[in-house]
Image (cartoon, rainbow, N blue to C red):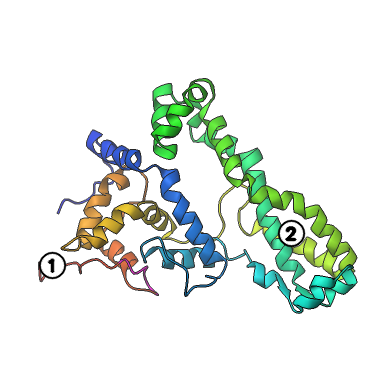
Amino acid sequence: MEPIDKTRAPTPADRQAVLELFYARPMIERGRPVMAEMMWVLHGRPDEERHEKILPEYCYPIFDVFKKTYFKGLPSLSDSVSVTDQTRLATAETIAEAKQAVRVDWVNLGKMFGIGMRCLRFAELEAADDLNQEGFGDLSTEKAKELCTVIMGRPWVAENWARIENESEDQIFTGLLNQSIESGVKSLQALQPRMEGYAYQWSPAAMSEFAQGLAEGMTNFMDADGQLVGESQRSGIYVFLLLVWPEIKVMLESSPKKTVRDLHEWMKPFMRWGLTAYVDIDYLRDVCAPPPSGIGLILRPLKTAASA
């Protein structure tokens, strides 16, 4: 087996393999089911018996890890607000009456709003600078077209060709980022003053606890440099394995089933292109091991040197 040369630049064949993968199914299309299922896990897997999983099984232990790392500071809605008397709540006309029917954890509620506001600030005020620093503002039109195709897909590029020619890439991607969070996060922006008003009427303690949670949420998910807090050593490879779930699904369903060696060999162009870190087979085998030590990406066992 050819070892990975960490010093070797990607070849034209490596580059073509990466482009063909994302031309066939762009990042945005790959990410939609991933985001939907991750939100289901983050919300506590509601109605699990009837929920139809739309991703390969190995993705869900990754979401569990993210819940404990990236999103460890994100409380669930059920941990923040719970109704204790539905009938009384339905007839409540004042805050005093609502307090008899609802239990509110104002710190947790503040954390939710703080995380949302931090994401909104990053999208509106910081993302463009980050993209410029990564060199996205100086791409040629052809490179910009290629990148937009990888992320958004050919139909989007065809519909937005004039935009690609006339706007810088950081403007395009910042606009797309804002658009993607608009319906969810921006609703928090509109709700925050109302929640502060409710806390004001609820009690002095509620005001203090909501402010405390807001401050914690602003820092425990994303730091001042826009980097996610709580990243694990395996986070990079986890993100990559989520991104290529359609191809791994084919491997899992193939007959005979692919091996860890097959997966490792297939990943090499992506390692060389920098889409995931360089890892050896033993490391990949540890990642793929059954939970709790791994994510349960069950391929055919890797042959040892003695049995090969």
Q: Main secondary structure of the magenta part?
A: loop
Circle 2: element type: helix
Q: Which residue is mark 2?
A: 214
Magenta extent: 292-297
Image point 59% across, 40% down: which residue?
Answer: 179
Classify mark 2: residues with Cα within 10 Å, few (<14), some (14-19) or many (20+).
many
In magenta segment, residue 294: yes
Q: Amino acid at mark 1?
A: Ala
Left or right? Give the position of 9 relative to 54. left
Total marks in image: 2
Q: Residue at x 26, y 48 (%)?
A: 268
Left or right: 69 in relation to 113: left
Residue 8 position in % (x across, y down): 26, 40
Please name the residue that numbered disc 1 is placed on.
305
> Residue 174 shows which numbered tag?
none
Quadrant holding the C terminus: bottom left
The question of residue 171 being in magenta is answered with: no
